[in-house]
Image (cartoon, rainbow, N blue to C red):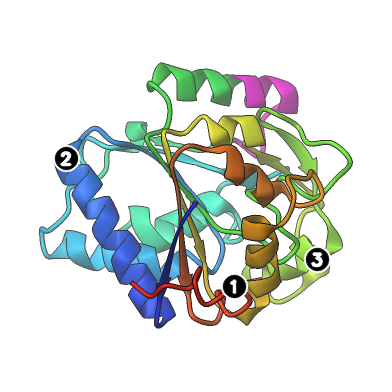
Amino acid sequence: MRLVVHRSQRDVAHAVAQRLVAELEGRPSLVLGLATGRTPIPIYQRLSALAGQGRVDFTRAATFNLDEFWRLPAEHPGSYRAFMARHLFGHVRIPPARIHFLDGMARDAAEECARYERAIAAAGGIDVQILGIGANGHIGFNEPAVALQARTHLATLKPQTRRANATFFGDDATAVPEQALSMGMATILQARSVVLIATGRGKGRAVERMVNGPLTTRLPASFLQVHHDVEVVLDEAAAERLTSAQRGRA
């Protein structure tokens, strides 16, 4: 893992957005894996601003979102499809046919997960996967467990994860769906490059365990240790549990 520490969340957002701009300039048909939640919002805001200035072009890119709540309609304001429309897709020029989501209202979860895996393969795989990390070390909706699902699957969410998503449901954790569709860890690890972002002290312990701890299904993010190209981008608060040598500033 390459660790990059920036002074603030704003600096993290600008750095990651600039990397994506450079990736798109070098490969306009880039296939992006995208995350949701509070952490990537400043990145999407920065990309939206750059798109408005004509400084980034998404017209030939393709995107695959990591996850979606199960049995939540796409038009529900708490859906990740609605989230992405608010924070990114409503502000950049990208053909709708090149935007890929899991369908939380699909008739059959297993069939929908298999369809998504086929769609990723048909696109040539994911070039750059953007990730956040949960305070309990989850990635996407791959929750800590005795065993992890390798491929896209229907996941049952931990209470902590539902509380973390309550912001999108009127701050009512009980309104957050109990299940979600999510890329599996093997699907994520097949991306050619991974960028994990973490900001705030609340993520510090999970980050330290991900970087220094053992490889374990109890901390799904630890599996990123085996990937050949992972950049971990942190603000100072998220990096405070790392050693001074690890916290070399950008």
Whether residue 58 is visible to the viewer of this picture, yes or no, is no
State whether residue 239 is above or below residue 37: below
Q: Which residue is mark 3?
A: 160
Q: Which residues are magenta?
A: 103-114
Q: At which x and y percent is residue 50?
A: 19, 64
Instruction: Name the side, left or right, on which 88 lies relative to 191.
Output: left
Near-viewer residue (75 or 169)? 169
Instruction: Name the side, left or right, on which 95 lies relative to 119.
Output: left
- Residue 113 included in the magenta stretch of the image: yes
Instruction: Name the side, left or right, on which 144 lies relative to 233.
Output: right
Residue at 20% from the left image edge and 50% from the top image edge: 22
- Residue 109 included in the magenta stretch of the image: yes
Pair 2/1: label in front: 1
Residue 242 image label:
1
Task: Tell whether label 1 touches label 2 (CB within 8 Å).
Answer: no
Q: Amino acid at mark 3?
A: Gln
Residue at 58% from the left image edge and 20% from the top image edge: 115
**Residue most toward the right?**
146
Q: At which x and y percent is residue 107?
A: 71, 26
